[in-house]
Image (cartoon, grey):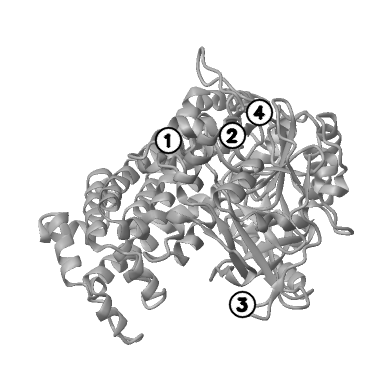
């Protein structure tokens, strides 16, 4: 076993990364620091990650469980994206105080608004725990036995880690398909308060029209503050809490950027699948993505009609609409990028070479075995994804299935039944038409035969379910028996079909795939000994480095790497919601002198979902921007990275400063920030 670990370790530290591809573990950044410094970085590995002294990792947080944020002052001030803070801002908004539309600026500390349910996590340390997690493993174990061992040992490792101090959380994550395991220990702070946010006409400028696109002119930022107990340790919300004092915070550079400048990003990329086989990629680009795009198009079209008709509905559904549309547009670019790069064929060609190399060895027949597993998995996985994008996407059905859990007031505050009913009809008709009958629940087929149509069934559910009546639900006893309620019955029967018919098959096949991919990952490393392998993203802290660079999306077209306020004015249109800017910005521009005010820039850093809000840092370790998106032509980077097209989109921190001071009139917020040139 020790020999296996030693071989793996030697494979992981080979040096031949392509361009600026890669999401590197901070604790191993010493293996990359020479390359970083050769490309312009002026700090050392200990400045990036250290458990013995304050380092840049201590200024970065996992924000809200799915984004990244960064500390920018000695008083717990935090920058992240507007879309990362969007849900919290929406919950704090009302018709009377529409912080989404109008923005929010705390003029004093006591005006900072507690964001209920929001937390941030600092990474305390990470370490390789492969030997502890696999302690007791033998090659004659079944995959199920191995999994049980990994779970048991991981729980023991986590339990020991969180016993070390207050507010600690721990996770053990598999890297390289379970060839390696790392422990991540976090300290979680639960008192986080909104300090400032621009109006959505700045924070979401361009809206869904510009999402994933370049040039971009979105002021995608929001400002929060972390509060702690008087001992600087995590504490539940209290008026007695004080601003958190960080171990480290970023200085903010106003020196600007230019093409070729070094950049690196520190953050929590969510999920990538760089090493999957051709059949996995083919399913994503030719089956899964097109199906999900179609289903979300139906939902978005319906919701937009209702949102356009009412300010109240717009507020209710702004966050939901943004959440639905984000992946919808990403999938479109992803499928197109995979096709443009000929990724399936490229992987097939690699697999043919691997097959030849593997003949007569331990990996012989492995590629063919994985291909057969995908053939078995695809119809079940398609049914799974359709279930998630239809039944589980219907709000009333989802709420009914979770009752009595969930906040009744919060659900109905942001719920419009007519829109939801129309979504039900569109989605369940799609389920009827596109999921093969042998993969549909008998309950669903019998129901269609009984009601005659999805529309009639919807009338029954939305007309008779107790969950369609807010007052009736509010008066329900928590132990009331509601299994015969049509909405709850619909949810229950589909969940039963899913858990009894779909999940068991997927679980068995995925278990076999996990084992096969573990071997295939190790085989790829042995086959390509000169290639640098970085672990797929899994919402753990990573470093990605690159440089400021434009790109050419098509023949005769070149996109420069920076955008300015001039571009905002060129798009400004009071008649189009996505492009209707604040009058204050028009007035400032009319005064002159702001045509070249920077707004956004692009770079070659390898990013993914979860990197939203990540600090973009220059060669001196100072903050120059906030990562918030990728260009549409490069969204396939979760699967295959193309240095020609893969660009991350960043808010230039100078635009953040401009908006806070000139639009918000809240320059006092930045008084505690340390600026550099």
Image height of 114 relative to 553, above or below? below
For disc 4, the neighbor class at 10 Å (few under 14, some 14 to 19, many from 20) is few
Marks 2 and 1 close (CB-CB < 8 Å):
no
- In the picture, the disc for residue 359 is 4
**Nearer-N-terminus badge (3/4):** 3
**Nearer-N-terminus badge (1/3):** 3
Determine the CA span between mark 4 and mark 1. 62 Å
User: Element at badge 2?
Assistant: loop
Marks 4 and 2 close (CB-CB < 8 Å):
no
Image height of 623 relative to 469, above or below? above
Residue identifier under label 1: 572
**Nearer-N-terminus badge (2/3):** 3
Residue identifier under label 2: 594
Q: Residue 380's spot in the image, x, y percent?
A: 39, 49
Determine the CA span between mark 4 and mark 2. 65 Å
User: Element at badge 4?
Assistant: loop
Residue identifier under label 3: 237
**Nearer-N-terminus badge (4/1):** 4
Marks 3 and 4 close (CB-CB < 8 Å):
no
């Amino acid at each position: 076993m020790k020999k296996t670990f030693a071989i793996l370790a030697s494979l992981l530290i080979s040096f031949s990364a392509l361009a600026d591809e890669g999401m590197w573990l901070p604790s191993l950044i010493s293996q990359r620091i020479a390359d970083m410094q050769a490309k312009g970085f002026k700090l050392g590995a200990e400045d990036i990650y250290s458990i013995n002294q304050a380092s840049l990792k201590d200024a970065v947080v996992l924000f809200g469980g799915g984004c990244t944020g960064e500390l920018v002052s000695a008083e717990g001030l935090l920058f992240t994206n507007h879309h990362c803070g969007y849900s919290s801002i929406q919950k704090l908004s009302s018709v009377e105080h529409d912080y989404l539309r109008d923005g929010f600026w705390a003029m004093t500390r006591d005006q900072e608004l507690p964001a209920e349910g929001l937390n941030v996590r600092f990474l305390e340390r990470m370490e390789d725990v492969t030997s502890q997690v696999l302690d007791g493993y033998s090659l004659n174990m079944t995959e199920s036995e191995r999994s049980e061992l990994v779970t048991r040992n991981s729980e023991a490792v986590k339990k020991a880690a969180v016993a070390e101090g207050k507010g600690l959380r721990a996770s053990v994550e598999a890297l390289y398909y379970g060839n390696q395991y790392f422990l991540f220990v976090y300290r979680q702070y639960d008192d986080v308060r909104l300090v400032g946010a621009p109006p959505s006409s700045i924070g979401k400028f361009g809206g869904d029209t510009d999402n994933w696109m370049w040039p971009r002119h979105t002021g995608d930022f929001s400002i929060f503050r972390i509060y702690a107990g008087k001992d600087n340790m995590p504490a539940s919300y209290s008026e007695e809490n004080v601003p958190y004092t960080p171990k480290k915070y970023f200085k903010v550079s106003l020196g600007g950027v230019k093409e070729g400048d070094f950049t690196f990003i520190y953050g929590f990329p969510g999920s990538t699948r760089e090493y999957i086989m051709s059949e996995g990629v083919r399913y994503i680009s030719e089956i899964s993505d097109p199906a999900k795009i179609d289903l979300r198009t139906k939902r978005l079209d319906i919701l937009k009609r209702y949102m356009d008709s009412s300010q109240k509905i717009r507020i209710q559904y702004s966050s939901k609409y943004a959440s639905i549309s984000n992946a919808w547009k990403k999938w479109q670019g992803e499928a197109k990028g995979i096709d443009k790069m000929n990724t399936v064929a490229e992987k097939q060609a690699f697999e043919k070479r691997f097959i030849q190399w593997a003949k007569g060895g331990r990996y012989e027949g492995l590629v063919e075995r994985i291909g057969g597993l995908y053939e078995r998995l695809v119809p079940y996985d398609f049914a799974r994804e359709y279930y998630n994008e239809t039944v589980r996407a219907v709000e009333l059905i989802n709420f009914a299935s979770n009752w009595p859990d969930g906040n009744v007031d919060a659900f109905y505050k942001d719920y419009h039944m007519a829109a939801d009913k129309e979504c039900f009809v569109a989605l369940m008709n799609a389920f009827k038409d596109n999921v093969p009958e042998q993969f549909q629940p008998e309950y669903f087929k019998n129901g269609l035969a009984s009601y005659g149509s999805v529309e009639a069934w919807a009338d029954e559910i939305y007309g008779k379910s107790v969950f369609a009546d807010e007052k009736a639900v509010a008066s329900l006893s928590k132990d009331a028996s509601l299994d015969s309620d049509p909405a709850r019955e619909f949810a229950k029967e589909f969940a039963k079909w899913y858990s009894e018919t779909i999940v068991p098959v997927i679980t068995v096949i995925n278990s076999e795939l996990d084992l096969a991919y573990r071997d295939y990952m190790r085989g790829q490393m042995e086959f390509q000994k000169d290639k640098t392998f970085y672990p797929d993203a899994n919402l753990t802290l990573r470093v990605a480095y690159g440089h400021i660079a434009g790109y050419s999306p098509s023949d005769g077209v070149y996109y420069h790497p920076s955008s300015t306020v001039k571009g905002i004015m060129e798009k400004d249109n009071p008649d189009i919601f996505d492009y209707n800017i604040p009058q204050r910005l028009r007035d400032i521009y009319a005064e002159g002198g702001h045509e070249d005010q920077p707004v956004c820039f692009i770079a070659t850093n390898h990013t993914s979902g979860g990197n939203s809000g990540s600090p973009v840092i220059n060669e001196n370790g100072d903050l120059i921007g906030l990562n918030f998106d990728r260009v549409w032509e490069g969204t396939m980077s979760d699967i295959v990275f193309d240095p020609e097209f893969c660009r991350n989109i960043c808010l230039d921190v100078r635009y953040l400063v401009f908006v806070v001071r000139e639009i918000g009139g809240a320059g006092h917020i930045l008084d505690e920030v340390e600026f550099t040139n």
